[in-house]
Amino acid sequence: MTHLMKMTRYITILILMFITYACSKNSQKVFDIKITKTETGYYYDIYKKNKIIIHQPNIPAAVGEQKFIDSIQCNKIAKLVVEKLENKIFPTITIEELKKNNIQFRY
């Protein structure tokens, strides 16, 4: 094998190792969601590295202390908040986002 072929092979292996490392690092889960049922509905908590960073006992943006009616709706909004956090966007939820996600609430 010529020196040039050996160098090309070595560089290709390094690039593949870097790509593999970068992909595995990005796929690591940073945030966790915990949905909890209460007597009046559902709420979510968001954890980062096993530390609670958001406790959301009510539907965000909704008037008063309204609870999510089921875990599916609760999880939708919790995932939206996590998506915002992952994209370094302030994790506020708007009335429009609640409507877009078919969340049942009073406004």
Image (tube, rainbow, N blue to C red):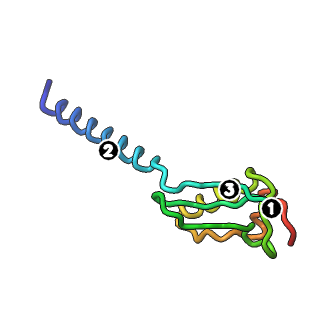
**Mark identifier at residue 18:** 2
Q: Position of residue 104 (x, y in %)?
A: 84, 60
Q: Foreground residue, 3 or 39?
A: 39
Q: Amino acid at mark 1?
A: Thr
Q: Is residue 1 left or right of residue 39?
A: left
Question: In what element is the residue under mark 3?
Answer: strand
Q: Is residue 18 left or right of residue 6?
A: right
Q: Position of residue 106 (x, y in %)?
A: 87, 69
**Mark identifier at residue 40:** 1
Q: Foreground residue, 1 or 78?
A: 78
What is the spatial separation of the Cα atoms under label 2 and label 1, in whole angstroms?
50 Å
Q: Position of residue 30 (x, y in %)?
A: 48, 55
**Mark 2 touches mark 3? (CB < 8 Å):** no
Residue linked to disc 3: 36
What is the spatial separation of the Cα atoms under label 2 and label 3, in whole angstroms?
40 Å
Question: In what element is the residue under mark 2?
Answer: helix
Question: In what element is the residue under mark 1?
Answer: loop
Labels 2, 1: front one: 1
The vertical placement of 91 against 5, above or below, is below
